[in-house]
Image (cartoon, helix red, strand yellow):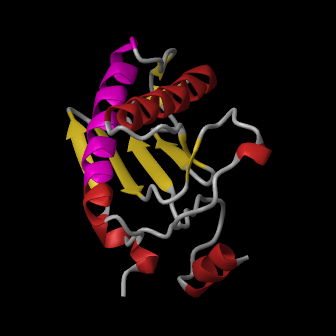
Amino acid sequence: MHLTEIAAALNLDGSGVGLMTGVDVTEVVSAAEGAVTVWATVGLGSPILAAASIADAAVVVAPGTVNIVASLPVRLSDAALVNAVSTVTEAKVQALRDLGIHATGTATDATCLVCPASGRVEAYGGPRSVYGSVLARVTYDVLMTGGRRWMSRGLAWSDRR
């Protein structure tokens, strides 16, 4: 696996998360509100509707992936982690809609949440919870910024020469 080879070359061991993208990672978009921070690489070259039939899938125009990493300052319960991933996804879809993109994302989007493993447990991560509401706003802002940037260029990083 390519990511495993990269990790080994960097002397990284143990468990972890690795994300791959066709977006130039130096163009990462980030924003924060309080202690909630979101980073995203935004490539929209192959937008999809999650519930559309594979037979109805459009021809891929250009590589595209939306990778989102969010950091929260509190430990989240397992249920709150699931809520928070859903909250990020909802904010992403809202941003795509507001950008005029009829899609729920791309087929290769990923979301990673980072939070402390100890401390007081926050039970909720939905869009109306204390931290989920902030997470939704920051995710939306990051996706709007990254989406506008991508749309202004019209090409995925890997297609620019």
Residue located 79% across and 46% down the image: 55
Q: Nearer the viewer, residue 122 or 59?
A: 59
Residue 73 in view here: no
Residue 146 lies in magenta, yes or no? yes
Q: Specify the principal SS of the magenta part.
A: helix
Residue 124 coordinates in the image, percent (x, y): 49, 15
- In the displayed structure image, the side of residue 158 where residue 110 appears, left or right: right
Q: Quadrant of residue 101?
A: top left
- Which residue ends up furthest to the top in the rendered image? 128
Residue at the spot 55% in from the left edge and 67% down from the top edge: 20
Which residue is painted at 41% across and 17% down in the image? Answer: 127
Q: Is residue 9 above or below residue 109?
A: below
Q: Is residue 55 visible?
A: yes
> Is 160 above or below relative to 65?
below
Q: Is residue 75 left or right of residue 100?
A: right
Comparing 108 with 44, the one in front is 44
Magenta span: 128-148
- Image location of residue 44, percent across then percent down: 45, 55
Which quadrant, please, contains the C terminus?
bottom left
Residue 143 picture location, percent across and down: 34, 44
Nearest the viewer among 87 and 37 is: 87
Q: How many marks?
A: 0
Quadrant where the image shows the N terminus: bottom right
Q: Position of residue 136 (x, y in %)?
A: 36, 27
Residue at 36%, 37% in the rendered image:
100
Left or right? Give the position of 145 relative to 72: left
Residue 144, by quadrant, is: top left
